[in-house]
Structure formats: structure tokens, C-alpha cells
Image: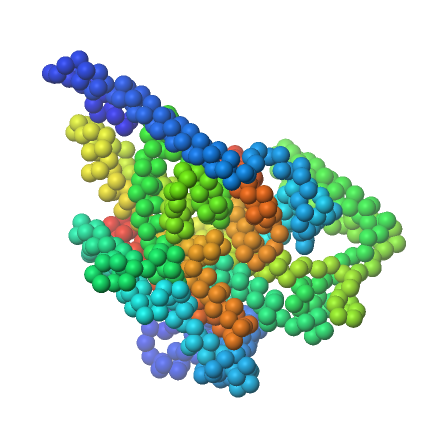
Amino acid sequence: MATTTMLPASGPNGAQRFAVWVRANLFNSIGNSIITIVFGSFALWVLWNIVKWGVIDAVWVAPNMRACQAAGTGACWAFVGEKWRFILFGRYPYEEQWRSALVTLILFGMTGASFVPKLWRLEMVYAWVAAWIICGVLMWGGVLGLAPVESDLWSGLPLTLILSLISMIFGFVLAIFLALGRRSNLPIVKLVCTVFIEVMRGVPLITVLFMASLMLPLFLPPGFSVSKLLRAVIAITMFLGAYQAEDLRAGLMALPKGQYEAADALGLSYWRKTKSIVLPQAITIVIPPLVGNLIGNFKNTSLVSIISLLDLMSTTQVALVDPNWRGLTSEAYLFLGAIYFAACFAMSRYSQWLEVLLNKGKRR
Amino acid sequence: MAISGVADREPTEGSSITKIWNNPTVRGVFWQIVLIVAVLGCGAYLASNAIDNLARQHIASGFGFLGREAGFDISEKLVEYQPSDTYRDAFVVGLLNTFEVAGLGVVLATILGTLIGVARLSPNWLLRKLAQCYVELWRNLPLLLQLFFWYSIMHVVAPGPRDAWVLAPDVFLSNRGLMFPVPEADATHKFIWIAFFVGIVAAIGLDWWGRKRQEATGQPFPILGAGAGLIIGLPVLVFLVTGMHLTLNKPEMQGFNFTGGASFSPELTALLLGLVVYTASYIAEIVRSGILAVSHGQTEAASALGLQRGKVLRLIILPQALRVIIPPMTSQYLNLTKNSTLAVAIGFPDLVFVANTQINQTGQAIEGIGIIMATYLAISLSISLLMNIYNARIALKGR
């Protein structure tokens, strides 16, 4: 779609260049001119209404919804001003919420750092282990003079982050075994892995979550209970593991056969071959789809609100129940949407960039 | 190939046990036995726990509950259903609702997604950018959030029936849902349907005959026009001949609500909007990449052969683009069907909603979840089976 080639290389000034560009890209035929005018005015109308509602007529400070409605017809951002802390951190004890916030920062920081290809080495794994230990101490407390906090009270953004990252990590470990198992030439190993993968990929996530929240307690011995959080982690890990296993299997299949044969010729054992030759190359191939999985998983964790875990989606729903602020759904969902969008959009841009970077050697 | 590295090497030293242990076949069998024992052992342990727990909580097991009275009403149903009907009937109602949403959603998402995918490739800069904004916006937001958003539009933002938004003549959107006109049933309509199906069969026959003739004589036959003429023309002809019996049953304000016409409940409207808008953003990208996947040389070569524009599209571009488009498209259709389970969050009575109610009432979680999982597995596996057959058929024939 490189219509910009119409531009003369030099000569005309900015305004003329702009006019040429507009004619070439927006008004180059009657049909295109109609499209430009119709869609342009529609887009402007939508944009204007959003700006009018969200900025010009908006109420920024008000004690409650009534005052908001009295003050203006637009958005009531006072709601977000009042509730943002609850939406972000939920039921975590108010005075201790700095701990939640710190965990959020650590997890965001570590995820960001893990996105830098230069930092992909063994030290990163140690850093993650350390980060999880620090996060665990901060969230649970009970040591170092921190007040203990039950995992049932964890909520909001930190919960969403913990859920999506930890299930991503455990899911990946599970996926390695599932993918290797499905490629194995031991028939029973292959059968077990294939059935697990296909069942998980064949059913909706919500059924797996229901299974973990409603069925799991039935399968455990009496007096033995698993917290809601752990149940959700188990469910998402199993679900995501199956999807990651299929990505990884594609990576395993994409490896040239010579790599396997060379490793065999060296007399390496199966695990040695897998660890040193096969997996490092296969994982590099599937990094872009894995980032895609991370985005999907981050969005999917919102489903835990259906099994009454207080993630970001749930805290927003709870905030909306407050009789003082009832009915301000658009404001709440816009605020929430902005958080999700920022994270997902950044990650999807990153994955496009990464794909180009990783394919540099293969491009001609 | 996994263990072939050590396969045929004679152990140079060591006892006979080491010798046996180093035999890859023996090791393979050993580990597989370990795996079977572990899987079966875990299964048996969990099952015995479940039996104990169920007995302690006095929960029945088995599917006997299916024949008992359900006792709850379902707000939306495509078939007759009352609370006094059985759980089996309730599950059928839920399943039909799931199929309704999935069917409508797939059709609408395909239309919207294709339009946006084509717009992504438009020579018009503005249209291209707007389509891109659409895709980026909707695929980067969780579907559940989108469903809650549309649901809140229906319930909080949308006006009452008196001030309903008029989307098109006789199409109203209010907090009671979407109201639209439907044709009134008439005795002559069944002949129109018959004519329609006759038209389809005739068009297929004509296509077959046209191909035969072209293979034999090289004479092309304009099947597209003739087929469309048969499929559309025959019913129209019957409609005209039988005396043009068509009255629209339009929704009209009466008292506090609309009467007449057909309607989608607010829940169904929100669910469909959410699923269609979300899935269309994925379909748009699939359509775009499918069109881009056909190299420009193909189009040029076809023009060089003297094919007309329409024929280039139909004979050269579409078959190659569809090869790229159809597999991911099917998986999007499956995703849409699976995502329709989020209906439970906004209270649309799909299969999961019914099962959830059943679990709450009877406590029989294993059976309820088993029914949902089995249903979705059946759908997924049959679609992937069809896809495998299709992929094998269209696979590039290597030489």
C-alpha cells in the first residue's frame, strides 16, 4: 500500500507535499472521495461525542453520583477518583496496600526486563526466583514485621498480574513435558499427552475454571482444602500449558532433522540432547507465539471473576455496586479498559518488533 | 528417534542388570508402565476421595437427575419449556441457545470481519487507518470486559421502550432489547422455500453439467449468473405467481412495551454484539493476511493470460486466498462458540448457565461439568476432523 511513492523526491514545500499526499491517498477517485467524506465525518462525529462526554461536559470532582449528575451531563470521573484504589487493590487491607503496589511494580518491572533480548540469560531466571520470593513475602506477610494477609484478600491488579504470570511460567514447564511427550515414540506417553492437550484445547476456559472451583474440592481428602487462588492457578496453568505445548511442538517440528541426528551421532542421551540441543533452538523459534499467549492469558484471567476471585474485573464490578455511585458503568469500564489496553497493546507491539528482530538472520 | 542414539551399542562392561537397563526398549516399557500406574493410581485415589466426599455430603451421583423436574424457568427458549419439565429438557433448551448464539455470531462476525479486513487493504488512507484502529482496539481488550460493557449499554445507557433508539425503519433498540420486523407466516411461503431448495439443487446440477461441457468442448458456461438466477429467481417467481403474500409483522409501541415483530433480549443482544465485534477483529486480520498471501505475480500472470478481472478474482486469487484463510477462520469459529460460554456472566441462558444452575440445585458438579465438557469436546473434535479432511484435500500437491 505504498502510495507515498507518488511524492516527488524534492522540490515542493511542506504544504504542497501535503496537498499531493491528500489527493493521492484520500481523493484520488470519486469513490474514494465519497468514502473519505462519509467515514471522515462519521469518525469526527464519534470523536467529538467522546471528547464532549469525556472531557468538556465531564465532572472531575464530586462527593457522589447525584452531585455528579447535577453538575454536568458528561462523564463522572469523580467515580474513578474515589474508587481507583479499590479497583486496583481491592480488599487488600488499606494500610498495607503499599505492599500490593510494590508487588505490582516489581512484576511489571521484571516482565519489562524479560522483554529485552540482551537480558536473556541464566541470571534472569535467578532474578525471577528472587522476585517471586520478594512478592510472596510482601503479599503474604507474617515475616519481617509485615502483618499477615490471607490470599483470599489479594485482589485487583496485583492478583491479575500474579495469576497471569505464574500460570504462564508453570504452564510453560508443563508445556515442555507435554510437547516432548506428544513427540515421543513411546505410545502410551504420546497417548496421555495428546489426550490431555486435545481435551484442554477443546473445552472453553470457563469449564476448566468451574472444574477447578467446583469439582476439585470433591476430589481432595476431607480436611484438606486448597485456596481459591491456587485452584484458579491450577486451572489456568493446565489450560494454558496445552496451548503452549502446541506452540512448542510447532517449534520442535520446525527444527531441521539434522540437529536431532547430529546429537544422536554424538551419543548424547535423550535428556542431554533435549536440554542442550533441541529445546534452546525450539524455544527461540516459538518466542513470538508465546508472547501472543501471554497477551491472551492476561485477557483471559478476567474470567476468574466468574468463579468469584477478586481480580481487576471483579473489583470494578464490586465498585459499581456501591449505591452512591451506581450506574457509572461507562466510566468504570473505560478506566479498566485503558489498563488492559495499555498492557495488551504494548505487548502486541513488542511481539511484532521481536518477530522482525528474531527473523533478521533469515531475511534475504 | 528419541533413544536411537544408544540403541545398538553393546555395553562394554557391567552386570547383566545394567545390560538390560541400558536396553532402550526395556527402559521405554518400564517408564510407560510407571506412567500408567501413576495415572491410574492418581485417578483411583481421586475417585475414592470423590466417592467418600459425595457420600458424606449426601450428594447423589449418576445421571439420574436428568429425568427429574428442573424447577427453574429459563427466560429465553427456542422450544417449549416450563419449570415443571425435566433437567434433560432444560439442557436441550440451553444447548439450542448456545447453537443460536454461535450460528448468528459466526455469520455476523464473518460479514463484519471480511468488510474490515478488506478495508484494511483499501487504497484510501483514512479507511485503512480506521479499520486498523478497530482491530487494535477490540482485540486488545478482554472479551468479558466487552460483554459487561455492551450489557451495561443495554441496561444502563439505553433508553426505555418509549424513547427507543431507531436504528433503521421499524428496528428499535431499548433496554428491553432489540426489536425488529419479521415476515408474517403465510400458507404460500412453503412453496417459496421449496422453490429455493429446488433452485439450489438445479444450480449444483447445472454447475456439474457446465464443468463436463467445458472439459469436453472448452466452452465456458456462466455458472455464477445462471446459478444465482436459479437460486434467487425461482423463489421470486413463485412469490409473484402465488400472489405476493407478504406482510411484515412490525414491532409497535403499545402501553409500556413493544408488541409484535421479533426481538432479541438485552442479554442476547449484548452477547451477540460482544462476540461479533471481538471475533470480527480477528477475522479481519485473517482475511487481510489471506489476501496478501497471494503473490502479485499470480494476478499479473492471470491478466497476461487474458482472463477478465472477475475471473482472475474467482479462479486465481480466491482459491489461493481461501487455502490460507479457511483453517484459521474455522478455529475462530470454534473460539466464538467456546467464548459464548461467557454468556453465564451476563445471564444469557446458554448450556453453561443451565449446567451451573443444575450444579447449584443438585450439587452434582461432576456430572454437570461433564455434560458441558463432553458437548464442547464433541463440537471441537468434529470440526477438527472436518478440517483435517479439508486440509488434506486442498493441500498443495507436491511432485
Q: Is residue B301 above or below residue A196?
A: below
Residue B221, percent from left and from top:
66, 42
Is residue A15 something that shows in the picture?
yes
State whether residue B316 appears in this view: no
Residue extending furthest toward the right: B243
Q: Is residue A350 left or right of residue A280?
A: right
Left or right of residue A70, residue A167 in this image: left
In the rendered image of this protein, does residue A37 appear above or below residue A120? below
Q: Residue at x 49, y 37 (%)?
A: B56
Relative to B122, is B55 above or below? Answer: above
- Foreground of the two, B147 or A79: A79
Q: Does residue A135 appear left or right of residue A249 in this picture?
A: left
Q: Position of residue A281 (x, y in %)?
A: 25, 42
Left or right of B227: which side holds B282? Answer: left
The residue furthest top is B16
x then y, percent, for residue B225: 68, 49
**Total marks in image:** 0
Q: Determine the residue located farthest toward the left in the rendered image.
A: B13
Look at 67% across and 63% down and name the residue there. Answer: B178
Residue closer to the observer: B34 or A35: B34
Quarter occupied by the C terminus of chain B: top left
Residue at image location 44% in from the left, 34% down from the top = B49
Q: Nearer the viewer, residue A83 or B278?
A: A83
- Image quarter hosting the N terminus of chain B: top left
Tell me where residue A8 appears, x and y as whole percent. 36, 73
Query: Residue at the location (38% across, 32% down)?
Result: B42
Q: Quadrant of residue A299?
A: bottom left
